[in-house]
Image (tube, rainbow, N blue to C red):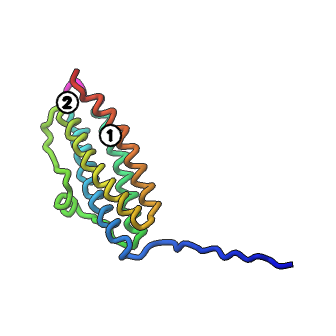
Amino acid sequence: METLEKTKIYKKLGFDSEETKEVVSNLNLFLANLHVHYQKLRNYHWNVTGADFFDIHETTEAEYNEVKEEIDEIAERIRVFGATPTSTLSEYIEISEIKETGTDLKAMEMVKEILRDMEILLSFMVDTIEAARAIGDISTDDLVTGFMKRREKIHWMLTSFAKED
């Protein structure tokens, strides 16, 4: 009796630094923008006043806690590739497209600023997903797609909240 042997082709675990160069670059840009966004959320949480205080105070706290987790996951994903995440505030501010604001914004100005930040973050998420897909990096694609789904929902909610009737 003859046995048929099948040879399974195994995928390698991990990528080399040349393959991941663009993914890491995009992750670092996303990371820098998230850090500035995170600090803006803290600023707004601490400094919101007026009739919308409770809504914005609670929403910004929930959001900065989510962003804090995303920051950690992105930095750890960069480390998976054997690279070093951008890690200083000065680097974040220098390369981030999201810019700091003062503490004197009105509540609805804060919401509109958060919405603008989310659109900037979306562009970095799309760039990162495209770079990940180009090398078959399903894990980064999945990670960032999850961030995108969550952010789309909060963007919708904040857009509805800020809508002027």
What range of the chain is rendered magenta? 49-55
Q: Report the residue at 32% width, 40% height from top.
A: 61
| Residue 53 sits inside the magenta stretch | yes
Quadrant in which the C terminus is drawn: top left
What x and y, as percent, mark residue 96? 20, 57
Q: Residues within 10 Å of mark 2 (few under 14, many from 20)?
A: some
Residue 59's quadrant in the figure? top left
Residue position marked by numbered label 2 in the rendering: 49
Q: N-terminal of the two: label 1 or label 2?
A: 2
Q: Are marks 1 and 2 in contact (CB under 8 Å)?
A: no
**Could you say whether the residue bearing mark 1 is in a helix, strand or loop?**
helix
What's under tag 1, amino acid-wise? Glu
**Could you say whether the residue bearing mark 2 is in a helix, strand or loop?**
loop
> Disc number at residue 61?
1
Quadrant in which the N terminus is drawn: bottom right
Q: Report the residue at 34% width, 59% height from top.
A: 128
Q: Real-space Cα distance between discs 1 and 2? A: 15 Å
What x and y, as percent, mark residue 39? 24, 49
Q: Is residue 29 visible?
A: yes
In depth, the one of 124 and 50 nearer the eye is 124
What's under tag 2, amino acid-wise? Thr
Residue sitting at the far bottom: 2
In depth, the one of 5 and 154 nearer the eye is 5
> Disc number at residue 165?
none
Asked if 39 appears above or below 93 in the picture, the reply is: above
Q: Report the residue at 27% width, 49% height from top.
A: 38
Q: Residues within 10 Å of mark 1 (few under 14, many from 20)?
A: some
Count of marks placed on residues: 2
Asked if 141 appears above or below 83 in the picture, the reply is: above
Residue 64's quadrant in the figure? top left
Asked if 89 appears above or below 109 in the picture, the reply is: below
Q: Report the residue at 24% width, 29% height from top.
A: 162
